[in-house]
Image (spheres, rainbow, N blue to C red):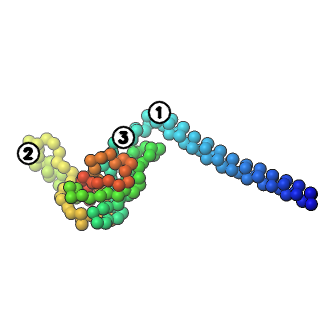
Amino acid sequence: MKKQSLISIIILIIASIIVGFFIGKYLGYKNGYEQAWETAKEKLRESKVMPPSPEKVLSIGGKIIKVENKIIYIKAEPVSINPLEDQGPAERKVIITDLTQIAKKTAKTPTEIQKEMSERVKAGIVSPPEPYIEETVNFSDLKVNDRISVSAQENIKYKEEFEAETIFVLK
């Protein structure tokens, strides 16, 4: 009986050592990885290779993934070109109010721009023409997969939900 108890205790001790080893190895790897990642990000910031992301973001671009009653959901583009910076939420809920202005911007052809430029030069206007045609549209004109630019009056860098001031559908 004592021999069987002794064997059970030895097996329990060996199993505990093995489990402890693997838990320690996992936690050590995880902590080491996180520490190395933070160090790499800090070194990149110090090197000034990548510009810092803006502190305040008032507009974002993205693609509409869902349209509901006065609400659109978008897959947002990153808020920074630095891949090591926090990019904010990938999906955003955009609330449309009665004050939200919605317009469609359609790119002009090079021929149209050249023609306008010639007319402006003849008229003595030195600034170039707008590269797009802008027209007001309704909420009902917004469709899934439309590429849009949304602006707000508040900092929306990390907001998952916000009210839109303007929405431009980009065609």
- The residue that appears at 43% across and 34% down in the rendered structure is 48
Query: Where residue 34 sits: x, y (%)?
Result: 57, 44
Q: Residues within 10 Å of mark 1 (few under 14, many from 20)?
A: few
Residue on which the image places disc 1: 46
Viewer-nearest of discs 2 and 1: 1
Residue on which the image places disc 3: 55
Q: Give yes or no for contact between labels 3 and 2 (Cβ–Cβ under 8 Å).
A: no
Residue on which the image places disc 2: 122
Question: Amino acid under label 2?
Answer: Lys
- The residue that appears at 19% across and 49% down in the rendered structure is 130
- The residue that appears at 24% across and 53% down in the rendered structure is 166
Question: Amino acid under label 1?
Answer: Glu
| Between discs 2 and 1, the one toward the N terminus | 1
| Between discs 3 and 2, the one toward the N terminus | 3
Q: Is residue 133 left or right of residue 119?
A: right
Q: Is residue 119 left or right of residue 105?
A: left
The answer for how far apart the CA atoms under marks 3 and 1 are is: 17 Å
Viewer-nearest of discs 3 and 1: 3
Give SS at disc 2. helix
Specify the quadrant of the image occupied by residue 133.
Answer: bottom left
Question: Amino acid under label 3?
Answer: Glu
Give SS at disc 1. helix
Give SS at disc 3. loop
| Between discs 3 and 1, the one toward the N terminus | 1
